[in-house]
Image (cartoon, rainbow, N blue to C red):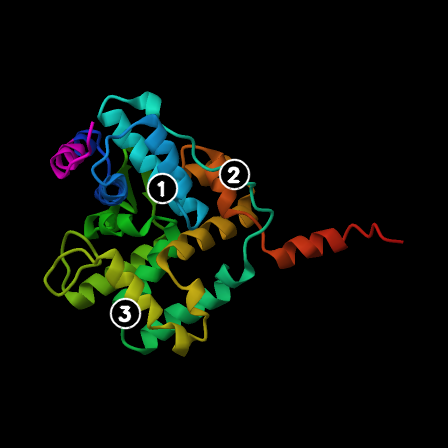
Amino acid sequence: MIITMDLLSHFDDYLCLDERSPATREKYLRHAERFRRWLDGEEVSKEAVIAWKASLTGAVSTINGAISAVNSLLTFIGHPDWKVKQLRTQRRLYRPENRDLTKDEFIRLVRTAENQGNVRLARAIETIAATGIRVSELKHITVESLTEREVSINNKGKIRTILLTADLCRKLKQYCRERGIASGPVFITRSGRPMRRTQLWAEMKRLCHAAGVTPGKVFPHNLRHLFAVIHYRLHRDLAKLADLLGHSSVNTTRIYLIETGKEHHAQLEAMHMVL
């Protein structure tokens, strides 16, 4: 079988029926198209897939993403037996310290956004950090949910309830009153559409210099990570945290809690094993 553009169009329909998110569909189609170009008109086969895998370069996560996409394509064309295994990596002992956003840095980002007059950004940053939601889920925070103090989020067929603190609801209600937002999503653009992930990311990056925070630490997902770290330090309940984050497995949640190298060194030093 030869992979054609027409076949990839039907592959997109297959992903849609499989209830894959728009972001996943876009990623899978991009990798599938690169696989098609790599084949260069040749028929796909198990041997070809193995050779293609060997040709991949870059970060392990990127390579495994490409493999997942092509494996899904192989299932679609009726050859799941041609699928290849992803690369295996040893679990990291600690995360790079230069990627770890602290609570003090989070506060500086919020204060800087307020000082610059970007109250929407300040409230969005606080909302993600106070709830642990994904940036794509920010659109589910509505005026109506502020009264209920909770919001139900359906992600990949799983529904979880996000509780909103009294302080967060108070600040978001005030924000909505000041901007005349009477219903629907709280975080909207001038045209009334929900704020996009790329827009939030770009606005956060513009805070870095004034807030004195390293740009590599400033991106929406790091706020979700900060929520996880602080919640776990306070409550030490991994299962509960997994539920709050919407993780199917606590193993995913553990990734969020890998300590920095500095913390790891301090724990080793505290053992006093060298006489």
Name the chief secondary structure element in magenta: helix
> The disc labelled 2 sits on which kind of residue?
Leu
Q: Give the mark, 3 or 1, whose residue is nearer the N terminus.
A: 1
- SS label for mark 1: helix
- Is 79 situated above or below 244? above
Residue at 41% across, 52% down: 224
Quarter occupied by residue 56: top left
Q: 122 or 165, which lies in front?
A: 122
Of the two numbered discs 2 and 1 on the same chain, state the one appearing first in sequence: 1
SS at mark 2? helix
Mark 3 and mark 2 residues within 8 Å of each other at the beta carbon: no
Q: Which residue is mark 2?
A: 238
Question: Magenta segment, which residues?
Answer: 1-13
Label 3: which secondary element = helix
Residue occupying the point 34% across, 41% down: 66
- Mark number displayed over residue 88: none
The residue tagged 3 is 119
Give the image location of residue 143, x and y in percent.
20, 53
Few, some or many residues within 10 Å of mark 1 (<14, 14–19, 20+):
some
